[in-house]
Image (cartoon, rainbow, N blue to C red):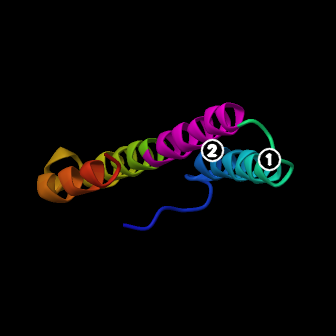
Amino acid sequence: MRLQPEDTKAVITRMKRAHGHLAGVIRMLEQGAECEEVLTQLAAVNKALGRSGYALVATGLQHCLATEGPNGLDARKLEKVFLSLA
């Protein structure tokens, strides 16, 4: 399924924010920041990206339900997508 850019705008914004945050983490490492501080920020980036994935799945699920109805969902495919984020 392909989603339209207007459907994924919030997810893209979230991912761009995480991208900027990751750039900050890289700068921290390059500048010799404390390991614990870097790991805390890296964990935050990781969580932000994970949430982006779940937001994308939710958007796709809403799209499928709206266009195809509940009978149009492929349960195995949906399970595979969720597990890919685990």
Residue numbers of the magenta segment: 35-53
The residue tagged 2 is 10
Q: In which quadrant will I find the C terminus? A: top left
The residue tagged 1 is 24
Please, what secondary structure does the residue beneath circle 2 have?
A: helix
On screen, residue 75 versus residue 47, left or right, reads left
On screen, residue 76 versus residue 63, left or right, reads left
Please, what secondary structure does the residue beneath circle 1 have?
A: helix
Residue 43 x %, y %: 56, 37
Query: Which amino acid type corresponds to the residue marked 2 in the rendered image?
Result: Ala
Q: Residue at x 21, y 56 (%)?
A: 80
42 and 80: which is toward the camera: 42
Query: Which amino acid type corresponds to the residue marked 1 in the rendered image?
Result: Gly
In front: mark 1 or mark 2? 1
Q: Residue furthest toward the bottom? A: 2
Residue 61 x %, y %: 34, 47
> In terms of image quadrants, where is residue 35?
top right
Q: Residue at x 70, y 50 (%)?
A: 22
Q: Earlier in the sequence, mark 1 or mark 2?
A: 2
Q: Residue furthest toward the right? A: 31
State the separation of the CA atoms marked 1 and 2. Answer: 21 Å
Q: Residue at x 52, y 37 (%)?
A: 47
On screen, residue 39 versus residue 34, left or right, reads left
Residue 33 x %, y %: 80, 40
Q: Residue at x 63, y 32 (%)?
A: 40
On screen, residue 77 versus residue 16, left or right, reads left
Does the segment drawn in magenta span residue 42?
A: yes
| Main SS, magenta residues | helix
